[in-house]
Image (cartoon, rainbow, N blue to C red):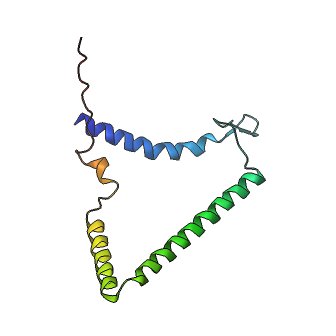
Amino acid sequence: MKFRVNKWILLGLLILIPLAAPAQKTKRSLFGKKNTVATAGPVTMKGKKQKQGEKVKERQKKAYEKARKKEIKRRFKMQTKETQARMKQTKKEANQFNKRNKDPFFSKFFSGTGKKKKHKKPKKK
């Protein structure tokens, strides 16, 4: 029971913290002026070179995915018609099996099962 209560407290904090964070951004002083509160960490601006580097990485990633899909199609077309039919059927069955056995992401928070802490072995003297 105690362990489940801690989960609910943690879940409540995870919901409330993002709601409370925007309220701390600005403050009004006695005279009506806005005083901004300093952020916790340093503010970093992205430079021109850094933005260009990110664009290059994105382009490379897209090109890789495009080439990978093209290669998969090429290997599929190399097979005989019977083999292509088997490959298609096997892929369909695998997708159905994997979709059925996938647990929703929130199930681990509300179920009593999960990773248990392992006890440490006593040291030998």
x, y percent for residue 65: 53, 69
Q: What is the quadrant of the N terminus in the image?
A: top left
Measured as percent of width and height from the top left, residue 109 is found at 31, 47
Residue at horizontal 62 percent and vertical 62 percent from the top: 58
**Quadrant in which residue 26 is drawn:** top right
Quadrant in the rendering for residue 81: bottom left
State the residue lying farthest toward the top: 125
Horizontal arrangement in the rendering, residue 123 relative to residue 32 (left or right): left
Residue drawn at (35%, 55%), measured in percent from left and top?
Answer: 105
Q: Is residue 95 above or below residue 115?
A: below
Above/below status of 69 relative to 111: below
Front one among 111 and 22: 111
Residue 83 spot, x, y in % from top left: 31, 83
Q: Nearer the viewer, residue 7 or 32?
A: 7
Residue 7 versus residue 104: which sits nearer the camera? 104
Of the 4 image quadrants, the one containing the C terminus is: top left
